[in-house]
Amino acid sequence: MTAPASETLVDYDEAIGRYDPVLGIEVHVELGTVTKMFDGAPQTFGDAPNTAITPVSLGLPGALPVVNGTAVEYAIRIGLALNCEIAETCRFARKNYFYPDVPKNFQTSQYDEPIAFDGYLDVELEDGEVFRVEIERAHMEEDAGKNTHVGGSGRIQGAEYSLVDYNRAGIPLVEIVTKPITGVGARGPEIARAYVSALRDIFRATGVSEARMERGNVRADINVSLRPSPEAPLGTRTETKNVNSFRSIERAVRYEISRQAGTLDGGGTIIQETRHFHEDTASTSSGRVKSDAEDYRYFPEPDLVPVAPSREWVEEIRASLPELPAVRRKRLQEEWGVSDPEMRDLINAGATELVEATIAAGASAAAARKWWMGELSRTAKNDGVALEDLPVTPAQIGELQQLVDNGRLNDKLARQVLAGVLAGEGSPEEIVTARGLEVVSDEGALEQAVDDALAANPDVVEKIRGGKVQAAGAIVGAVMKATRGQADAGRVREIIMEKAGA
Amino acid sequence: MTASTELTRLSAAELAERLRAGDVSSTEATRAHLDRIVAVDGPVHAFLNVDADGALAAAEKVDADRAAGKDLPALAGVPIAVKDVVVTHGQVTTAGSKMLEHWVPPYDATVTRLLREAGMPILGKTNMDEFAMGSSTEHSAFGPTRNPWDLDRIPGGSGGGSSAAVGAFEAPLAIGTDTGGSIRQPAAVTGTVGVKPTFGGVSRYGLIALASSLDQAGPVSRTVLDSAMLHEVIGVHDPRDSTSLPDPATGLVEAARRGDVAGMRIGVVTELGGEGYQPGVRASFDHALELLAGAGAEIVEVSCPNFEYALAAYYLILPAEASSNLAKFDGMRFGLRVEPDEGPITAETVMAATRGAGFGDEVKRRIILGTHALSAGYYDAYYGSAQKVRTLIQRDFNAAFEQTDVLVSPTAPTTAFRFGEKVDDPMAMYLNDVATIPANLAGVPGMSLPSGLSDDRLPVGFQILAPARADDRLYRVGGALERLLTDEWGGPLLDRAPELTTQEVTR
């Protein structure tokens, strides 16, 4: 799918020159509870379809929901981390709509009584500027199942049939809704991205979710509207649904600003509608027009009693919250002595936890950072996996670095050992033993190797003696080759100079 | 009367006693009831399906356990019938609808599980108005149930099957569900006892929901004591139902046995007994009051002014919740699936065709009403107002219970009407539940027990209402009144019902 040809795009900077963009972001996060929101079915990922289900998650006749207490606790954790008020009492409501992936044909959600409301999140941008995003509310709800449309283009139109997997149906979600985000100017796309990224970090830090974007644990709906000036009333907004990578969030905002400016410049009006984001073209296309949106016929869920978290419990949860990402980041940056851009690189690579654990395993901050941001980042990129999904642990990197620090490995050998670890050959120590990769530290053996190399290259010896010290490199290379790279190159050069030097 | 027929005339308490004494086995008792079903259920049609094998297997298990000297629950071995809105694992459960004609649930309702754990053989599933909508059991998709007192008359609804099964001696006990009177009103018109416990007193898990905030399962029996015994079996806390009360129902059997009203203040609700009440119904009710006063109760008149809005509020709240609860019947995952005759086959067209074919008129009427009542722009005027009325009715009850221990009224304004008499006039049908509905809106418990016969020789029900979680008072007053009345009659009221023509049972 590409953008319809009729859409006129305005250059981004021109669009920003003429209009004031306003954003609104709704983020859904799947909570990492053991069981589902309203029943005892296990929460799993990647299982055979329709195996993690009960009569409740299938919406069978007679089945009733019961609220998962851990999900409520997690929702409160999120609310507190976002500086929200926590409701003294709140209720669930039914959002009625018909779709085969919604087993009961209504979603149990919170409507006019969310568990958390009126908060904010301070978001740090690339250049260190802090932008405050006001939070309207955070409420609890359940996820739907997953439809797979078979045949045709894979979309529902033209499909031969559709399959439904209810394993995801009923997984607890928290939806976080911002107030209109104003004053973003040209930085709208960056702010949107940074906000969702900051949320993701909070989800992880508070332990409420693994927050894996690629698994759809975190999904963002992005609202964009334009107005002629910051003083003008809010313009009509569009909502781009289910954007689930940071890059896409940034691109979706950018595209909508350019597209809406094009429509407005041409004297057109923006239609309130949902839009789909297309990864391949970085564009959005019209989905459902909201003006004939369904009437959800909300009403209080009569199968559930109100949720009334006691103030004592809320305070206990507040007291048990871990150090939040922004605070932690500052602390680590100071401890590790890294610059702002270096710290951002670590964060963007998802490496802070890994580096921290590697330091705990005995490596220096510089070494830990070097491994994860260097060799391992390259490997992850080549393999197309997240850094944390590489088959190597921070403890193993720590062990590897200690071998280097003790002089038993040089850098080149260490990289070979690491390749062995990644290939699943065992711990660094085991690989050193199995592959015989240790640095040759036996002076006698090194001297013998140098003698052999010098004897084989009398012309080079002449050059060195003639003052061409750089010619020694050829001898170093020969020695390294003879010792299969296991010699300490610096020491080899010293021995050469002792023996051949003037 | 053969020995086998005699077993079916016993009350559940008497049968339990005989089982405990070893005079009779559960297998014999269960077989006697199965025989009675074969003999009389053709014309009565109380059952939608009978599970003879399952019931006999459960009976044999109880007999074996008893022979092994195990300590068994009070009602172990006593067979029971279950309204077909309660799901039974492995046994077809239809809720009286074509939508679920062949649906075999993969799980048990909590009530079903409790009955099994109590060693009670489940004879079969009883007929009902489709999805429990109706006051006559004429709205069952599988044909009506007939009143054992007069086969030309309705057995009440929606639980007409359960009451008729007990009234026709096909089962000593049954489970009903009461959303606006569906246990009490059928009990009234069939001369049986029916109890709607306090909301949350019996788990709703596995009850196919009509209106979640009103639905309540409860006992159907021939005596007050039998209801008390069954109530104690099913009235336990269930973590699978978040509205389930934390404390189990206790002291009910004791209250029924004690049956003493001396010093109790019994309130007669002015608003439940005026216009529209059949004279014979009123006379029977007044006579019962005299008996209670004679036994030492103080009779006081109380007014519940907001009860006049109860019916209107009920017929907004019920359809609203029902429209949402019934949304799952869409032909996608279970039950009936109908594809459209022409045009494209999409999720929407299959849902439409399935619902068109699967739901009856009364169900469609209420879904449309409920959908409208919840729709944007109408919510406040309809559903919101109805919820406010509900609060006012709760206040009426609270005020009335400050002056009284229980409230009483006739259960239904009339005796059983004839088939077809009201089926084309939904409002007239709805008025039949005018006395029972306030209890559901307020969540308070209620009982109906027979107070005698009206001029038309048909049974009249006497309703007792108690404050929430004071279910024991129903049994205290009910037990007392039942004793006074049976003394007067010289035996149970059901002994006066005409004999049903029976078919020879051959085995």
Image (cartoon, rainbow, N blue to C red):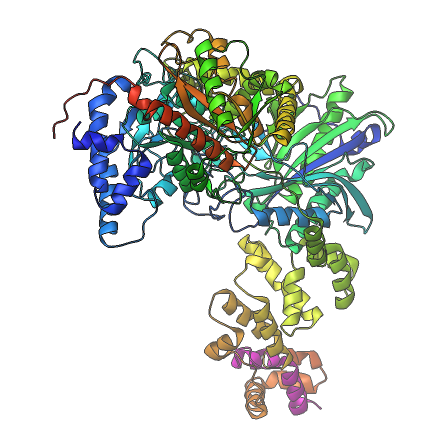
Quarter holding the N terminus of chain A is top right
Q: Is residue B66 above or below residue B34?
A: below
Over which residues does the magenta segment extend? Answer: A475-502
Vertical side of A480 occupied by A157: above or below: above
- Which quarter of the picture shows residue A377? bottom right
Task: Indicate the position of residue A385 as horizontal and vertical percent values.
Answer: 55, 53
Residue A479 falls inside the magenta stretch: yes
Question: Relative to B440, is A208 on the left or the right?
Answer: right
Is residue A152 or residue A463 the one in the foreground? A152
Residues A360 and A155: in front is A360
* Res A323 quadrant in image: bottom right
* Image x and y of residue A487, in percent: 58, 82
Residue A280 percent location from the top left of the image: 59, 36
- B205 vs A278, left or right, is left
Query: As drawn, which residue projects farthest toward the bottom?
Result: A444
Q: Is residue A351 left or right of residue B318?
A: right
Residue B110 visible from this viewpoint: no
B440 relative to A26, above or below? above
- In this orientation, does residue B457 appear? yes
Q: Position of residue A101 (x, y in %)?
A: 48, 33
Residue at 69% x, 27% y: name it: A238
In reply to whether residue B57 is colored magenta, the answer given is no
Q: Determine which quarter of the picture holds residue B135.
A: top left
Position above or below: B425 against B230: above
Residue sticking out furthest to the left: B507
Prevailing SS of the magenta stretch = helix
Instruction: Specify the quadrant that holds the C terminus of chain A.
Output: bottom right
